[in-house]
Each structure stands twice: as structure tokens, then as C-alpha cells.
Image (cartoon, coloured by chain):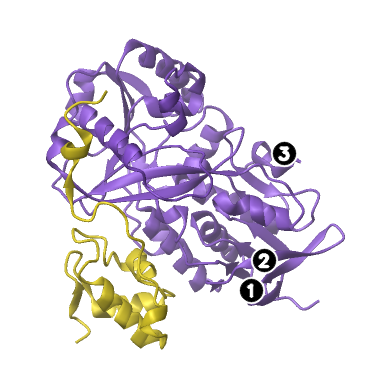
Chain colours: A purple, B yellow
Amino acid sequence: MNRDADVIVIGGGIIGCSAAYYLSKLGKRVLVLEREDITRGSAGATDGVVGYHTKKPGHQMDLAVQSIAMFENLSEELGMDIEYGLRCGGMQPVEDKMQWDILSEIVEEQRKSGVDIHMISIEEARQIEPQLAPDLYGALYSPTGGKVNPIRMTIAYFRAAKRLGAEFLTETEVTGILKEGSCVLGVQTDKGEYRADAVVNACGSWAAFTARMAGIEMPIKPRKGQLIVTEPIGPFMDCTLQCARYNVIKFRPETIKDPAVLKMGASLSIEQTESGGLIIGSTRELVGYDRENTLEAIETILKRAVRFFPALKDVCFIRAFAGLRPYTPDGLPIIGRVDALEGFYMAAGHEGDGIALAPVTGKLLAEQIVYGKESYSLEPFSPNRFL
Amino acid sequence: MEDVIICRCQEVTRQEIIDAIADGATTVDGVKRRTRAGMGLCQGKTCERLVARIIAEQTGRPMSEILPPKSRIPVRPVKIGIIGGEQDE
């Protein structure tokens, strides 16, 4: 059969570019099809938290531990500075005893994966981040978490994959999946047909559409996150910081009583980037594919920011933006082969953890495709759990 | 000529923009993500059309087909305190 590549990767975001790189590294001829441009979707509309403390205890945390270890040498490996702040630390200040108790309980679970996460007093927290408001209750602290520039990281994977021979076709939209019986043959696009032995669906929040083209239902929904960026300022903070509500909304939504908070899912997430600007977010809204900003959300986020960092009230914000995080019902990403369709693989559904989990996702998926078996089991993330 | 600064906020040169186009950028946004041109204090108000013109010149596409970046609030830098107030809730 006439083939255009060994593996076709659909989607030029952080997951698709990572998969393309690790597949190329294992000697596969890779073709990436992207309907717009590299890093045009969610990878380019997010912050760069690479932390342990925002991960769900258990399988997701174990996967994060492996992924974050890969960040240490990633700039050198990819040959481009991805602005990785190694061990800048992650912090979640809490406002009251109830949040303290909920976070303490989650921390105990998270520590089972062998990571250093612990609770500290507000005095200790303010020694680490002196700009923090003094009237807080305490904080969760994870000293070894990092932060990265997600756009540069995606571009670094893209360029490194290209150097290894991967081909990227942008402005090329996949319109169908070519099959014969229960075997995938390739894809149909608006520019013609492309054939390969394996097809990877790395379409993030749009992955359910692509899966449906192959006759597979994947429960991935877009969840909007709104953020703002400030003007560049001098050194303000080192940690990536979320208010405790971030983890409470993520892991214990049933404890939130205010319906407005739950609907918007608004909590503070803040970090200072290498260029000096602060990225401040974020919301978690199930509102379809809308990527507009709302004044209501921005007001909520900025109020949170001033509550935790009073000095920010005199800093200007210069832009609002929004990205769609691919939500799954069980909060775990969907990675690996689809048993019902030979040659079809999923790599999507990472919600807000796509940047942090991208290295290990690409690496293990490439191993599964090339060797038939990955070095660390992807079983808990298998798409077959939904089929 | 190629070392002329096109985006003054982020100090991006004409050569860097030409390199981004060679890297696959076909829109102002594609150049922005690769070079940071337009990500600074003025949010591309000065360089946006200059970048679009360089894309047109390098790719041979007409100016009218070069997609501008998405407009987002605020139009001008706004102090966080004006919207975020002094205190939460």
C-alpha cells in the first residue's frame, strides 16, 4: 500500500508536537496535520505551571512525577530554551480552616507518590513570597515544582521533531478517517488523502470530533479558562501560586456551596513569566467552544489577585485571553491504543495538565506505537475505559 | 535593513520575523507566537500592520488575506485595582 508516513499525528499543539518528536526519535516517519498553526489552540492560551500539587493523587500524580523529571534537561534535549524555571516552587495559600483541612487531606494522598508537598504557616509562606497578604491562614507548599513557557515548549518540540525528519502540514484540516474493517488506513483532509499505519488523535478539546470521524465516542468536552497578562514588572514572585480554591474546585467540588463559584470555577492561578509579565487566571467553564473573555470572569479573577497580592492593584493588565482545556469525566487524560480500531491512538483529554504531562505522554505513546509496549503502563489512561 | 526593529515593545527585528515566516507562520498571530512581536505593552498597535506587510511580501499572499490577530480586552493597559477593587467579596 502507498504510504505517506509511518504515523500521522492530528493536531499541532503541545501533545501532538511532543508525540511527533518522540516518534521521530524512535525512527518513525511522522506526518503532523494541523488545521491552523502550531501552538494556535490551547497550548498558546495557558499558563506554564509544571507542578505536582495540582495533580490528582494516584495514577495522575505518578505520571506527573515521571513527566516533570523529563523537564530538567528538556531545553538541552530540544536545542531551544523553553524558559523552564527549575524548582521555582508551587504554593497554594488557604483562607480558612476548612480549606486547610481539605488541602491537608489531599496532600496526604499526593505524598504517597513520593513528592514533597506540605502545609506551612502564613509566616513561612510570606518568607518565601513576601508580597502575599498577611491575613491569610496558611499555605500548601511544594518546593520542587517548576514553570515553563508553554508556547516556546511547543515550538521547541515542533522544531526538534522537524530536525529528526517529521513533516508538518499546517492549514490542513482532517475531514475523515480512512478505515478498512476495523483497521485504520489514514486520513482524509481538505488537501487530499494521507495514508499511514497508525493515526494519533491529539486534537485536545476537539478530540471528540476527530474520534467520531473514526466511529468512536470519546467523552472529551471543552472547558474554558480565562486569563489575563500584566505589563512587565520587576521581580515580584518566584513560585507558581494558586489560591486553595483551585484544588478544592478540582478535587472536592462538592464542598463548594456558592453556585456562582462552581459555575465559573474561578480560582486564582498566578505566575511571573521570564519576560516580567504576570499571567493571572483562571476559570473552568463548561460553555462549549466559546473562547471570548467576559468582564464578569475578569473581575472575579482580578479581585482574587488583589486579595492575595494587594500590591497588584497598581499594576496594569494589558491583555485578556482564553483557552479550552479538554475535560474528561474522571479527570484523567486519554492516552493509548483504541482496541476497537487497529492503528488508532488517542492522546488528549489532559484538561489543565497538558503542558506538565506532555513529555511523558509523547514518550510513552511513542513507545507503545513502536514497541507495542510502553516502559511505564498507560493502562489507567487507556481510551478503552470509555468504550 | 534586516536588523530594523519592527516590534519596539519586545525588540523584534525584521530578520526574526522573516525567520518566523520561514518556520511556517502565515498570520500575524503565527509570527507573534514565534517571536513575541505584538505581545508587549502596546499589544501590536504599532507593529501589527508592519508584520502583516512582511508576511505578504515573503509569502506572496495579498495583504487582505493576512489574518490580523484577535482583538482582546483591554484596549489600553488598565490598572488591576480599577476592576479588581481593593478587596475580594
Secondary element under disc 2, as helix, strand or loop, is strand
The numbered mark at residue A58 is none
Of marks 2 and 3, the one in the foreground: 2
Between residue A27 and residue B62, name the one nearer to us. B62
Left of A175 or right of it: where is B75?
Answer: left
Disc 3 residue type (three-letter): Phe
Please state the horizontal and vertical placement of residue B32, each as a whole percent of the image: 33, 66
Residue in the picture at 15% in, 37% down:
A313
Determine whether A29 is above or below B86 in the image. below
How far apart in space, not on screen, are marks 2 and 1 (Cα)? Answer: 7 Å
Please state the horizontal and vertical placement of residue A13, each as a whole percent of the image: 50, 58
Q: Chain of mark 3?
A: A
Q: Are marks 2 and 1 on the same chain?
A: yes
Please state the horizontal and vertical placement of residue A36, each as a whole percent of the image: 50, 67
Question: Label 1: which residue?
Answer: A190
Between residue B87 and residue A164, name the one nearer to us. B87
Disc 2 residue type (three-letter): Thr
Q: Earlier in the sequence, mark 3 or mark 1?
A: 1
Secondary element under disc 1, as helix, strand or loop, is loop
Question: Label 3: which residue?
Answer: A386
The quadrant the N terminus of chain B occupies is bottom left
Which residue sits furthest right?
Answer: A181
Left of A29 or right of it: where is A320?
Answer: left
Residue in the picture at 49% in, 23% down:
A253
Q: Earlier in the sequence, mark 2 or mark 1?
A: 2
The quadrant the C terminus of chain B occupies is top left
